[in-house]
């Protein structure tokens, strides 16, 4: 059922629209307007400990409802934003929306777990990124311990000292760093040991055919263990995938089996609420 919901979010969108240049240009303009008018929203997908079934965190995912075309998937609008110099303002809008939501939940007595935000490698070329995170945390009176960023493996291909020192600075203020879609890039494994990160996120393509990819998953889990990194599997859809992941030592999981990404008001019903102070 959850899987159907996930697909249905995009039922009004036709991929052929972006294959035509005219419409791509139109989408770019509409996206710019949507960012300026702060009309993007955020869905939250919980992450779980597969043994205790407790929520360990959530991933924030950008959502854009186009006034005429309906929901447009981030797989379409994020690349457009990256090409059109819109990714930094887009991600800063998402960061602020997440922070403001976390504050609202805290004020209402929720035990808010760590929330991850996807950050494009392009954002690391904006030299004030770390400062922006520090200032914005302060502005919302939040701590880095509530935040995680997910960066794709492309961050490892670049091998840039400046990126690594930014990751280090973010970790120094309590923010965790995860490598998203791990295993799909052509990254240097020797560089991984030098990179300042906390967690590997095993790409969902390995999980969706987990029996065939058993050795690969097992290798990634051992590598994480040896490098003293945490590990999570994304795109978990079946109980047998969970059993396999547990047997291979991967405890943290995320996917439609547990929950699709949800609007904030639906996700909050899954969080624990502390007794309200009077
Ligand atoms: P991602 O960060 O790897 O996020 C996981 C994607 O897989 C999400 O798609 C999520 O809805 C989907 N998913 C979760 N569980 C399952 C499952 O069990 N089965 C399957 N088949 N899919 C599952 P979504 O929300 O469409 O996002 C796609 C990608 O767009 C994300 O991949 C991420 O790379 C990017 N994205 C989304 N929001 C942002 C953002 O604010 N900034 C940046 N840079 N990228 C973003
Ligand atoms: Mg992600
Ligand atoms: Mg991913
Ligand atoms: Mg991805």
Image: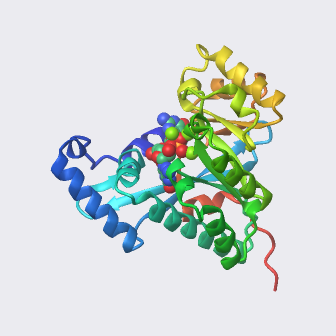
Q: Where does the C terminus fall, quadrant-wise? A: bottom right
The answer, for residue 236, to whether it is visible in the render is yes
Q: Which residue is at 59% across, 58% downward?
A: 267
Residue in the foreground of this view, choosing between 107 and 52 = 107
Eyeballing the image, is 242 above or below 142?
above
- Horizontal and vertical percent position of residue 108: 70, 76
Which quarter of the frame holds ligand 3? top right
Describe residue 278's horizontal placement relative to residue 121 as left or right: right
Q: Which residue is at 73% across, 61% downward?
A: 146
- Horizontal and vertical percent position of residue 24: 23, 51
Residue in the foreground of this view, choosing between 142 and 245 = 142
Eyeballing the image, is 228 above or below 26?
above
Describe residue 55's horizontal placement relative to residue 213 as left or right: right
Eyeballing the image, is 147 above or below 18?
below
Quadrant in the rendering for residue 136: bottom right
- Horizontal and vertical percent position of residue 76: 35, 46
Q: Which residue is at 78% across, 37% downward?
A: 229
* Numbered label tally: 0
Please, which residue is most extreme toward the front here?
161
Residue in the foreground of this view, choosing between 162 and 223 = 162
Quadrant in the rendering for residue 233: top right
Give the image's coloring scheme.
rainbow
């Amino acid at each position: 059922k959850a899987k159907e919901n996930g697909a249905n979010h995009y039922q009004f969108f036709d991929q052929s629209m972006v294959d035509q240049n005219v419409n791509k240009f139109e989408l770019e303009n509409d996206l710019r307007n949507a960012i300026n008018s702060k009309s993007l929203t955020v869905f939250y997908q919980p992450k779980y400990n597969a043994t205790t079934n407790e929520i360990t965190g959530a991933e924030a995912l950008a959502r854009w409802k186009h006034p005429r075309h309906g929901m447009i998937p981030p797989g379409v609008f994020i690349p457009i934003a990256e090409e059109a110099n819109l990714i930094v303002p887009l991600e800063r809008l998402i960061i602020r929306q997440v922070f403001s939501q976390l504050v609202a939940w805290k004020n209402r007595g929720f035990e808010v777990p760590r929330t991850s935000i996807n950050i494009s490698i392009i954002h690391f070329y904006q030299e004030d990124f770390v400062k922006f995170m520090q200032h914005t945390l302060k502005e919302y009176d939040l701590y880095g311990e509530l935040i995680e960023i997910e960066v794709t493996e492309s961050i490892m291909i670049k091998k840039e000292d400046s990126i690594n020192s930014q990751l280090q600075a973010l970790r120094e203020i309590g923010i965790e760093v995860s490598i998203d879609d791990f295993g799909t890039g052509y990254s240097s494994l020797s560089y991984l040991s030098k990179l300042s990160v906390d967690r590997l996120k095993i790409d969902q393509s390995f999980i969706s055919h987990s029996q065939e990819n058993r050795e690969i998953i097992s290798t990634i889990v051992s590598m994480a263990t040896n490098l003293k990194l945490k590990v999570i599997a994304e795109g978990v859809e079946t109980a047998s995938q969970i059993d396999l992941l547990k047997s291979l030592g991967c405890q943290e999981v995320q996917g439609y089996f547990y929950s699709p990404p949800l609007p904030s008001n639906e996700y909050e019903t899954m969080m624990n609420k502390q007794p309200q102070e009077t």
